[in-house]
Image: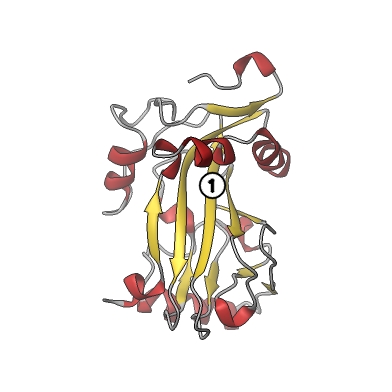
Amino acid sequence: RGTYHKAFIQVGNLWELSDTVRKFVFARRFAKIAADLMGVDGVRVYHDQALFKEPGGGPTPWHQDQFYWPIDTDKTITMWMPLCDCPLEMGSLVFASGQHKQGAFAQIAISDESARLYSEFAKKNEWRLGIYELGMGDATFHAGWTPHKAPGNSTDKMRPAMTIIYHAHDARITEPANESQPMDLERWFPGLKPGDPCASPLNPILWHKDESLIGTV
């Protein structure tokens, strides 16, 4: 496996497969936190991902999540929650605090090259890094353009983590800007095209200040 696939094993949209996971992913309390942090009236779910960093698994290189998303807004955010106690040596996340305000640093996917390039940005611009040891069930929220990475898992235990990605309820789909975005468009916005609202049956409103809209497409 290459660098990307050594970093973690991922499974997306578990809420489609499990009623238990659906209750977790659709939880209003998580969605309201996301809405409050972004300063928006409502949020939709983009998708969820379970990320498993294997014992001895490699580092997750520097990257920005929104590189992959054909969405016309910077009002995007990811909740990341470890499902076990997660010390740094297990692969807890490292964030470049405040750098989401700069938007895209580079149109580059997770790779050895992104690790090199973002490390140069971090050194040159003296990025302030947020490094956290998390307990089981703790959560972080990071904007779609927040550069982040994770060290490898040097322990003998699996590091399971669950993520939920949210975006502003009124976001629209953009023309794919790189070779990765057409796959996201097809998978997470089925039947939709650039210019349409980001509102397929997979993207219901999870929280809105008008409660009558919660759960609608």
Q: Residue at x 61, y 21 (%)?
A: 214
Q: Residue at x 55, y 65 (%)?
A: 147
Coordinates of residue 125 in the picture (x, y in percent): 62, 77
In the image, is residue 1 above or below residue 50? below
From the image, which quarter does the N terminus lie in?
bottom left
Question: In this rendering, does residue 196 appear at all?
Answer: yes
Q: Which of 136 and 217 lies nearest the eye of the viewer? A: 136
In the image, is residue 106 above or below residue 156? above
> Which three-letter amino acid code belongs to the residue tagged 1?
Ile
In the image, is residue 145 above or below residue 188? below
Residue 67 falls left or right of residue 183: right
Coordinates of residue 76 in the picture (x, y in percent): 56, 44
- Residue picked out by circle 1: 164
Q: Which of 39 and 138 lies nearest the eye of the viewer? A: 138
Q: Residue at x 59, y 70 (%)?
A: 93
The quarter of the picture where residue 102 lies is bottom right
Disc 1 crowd, CA 10 A, few/some/many (<14, 14-19, 20+): many
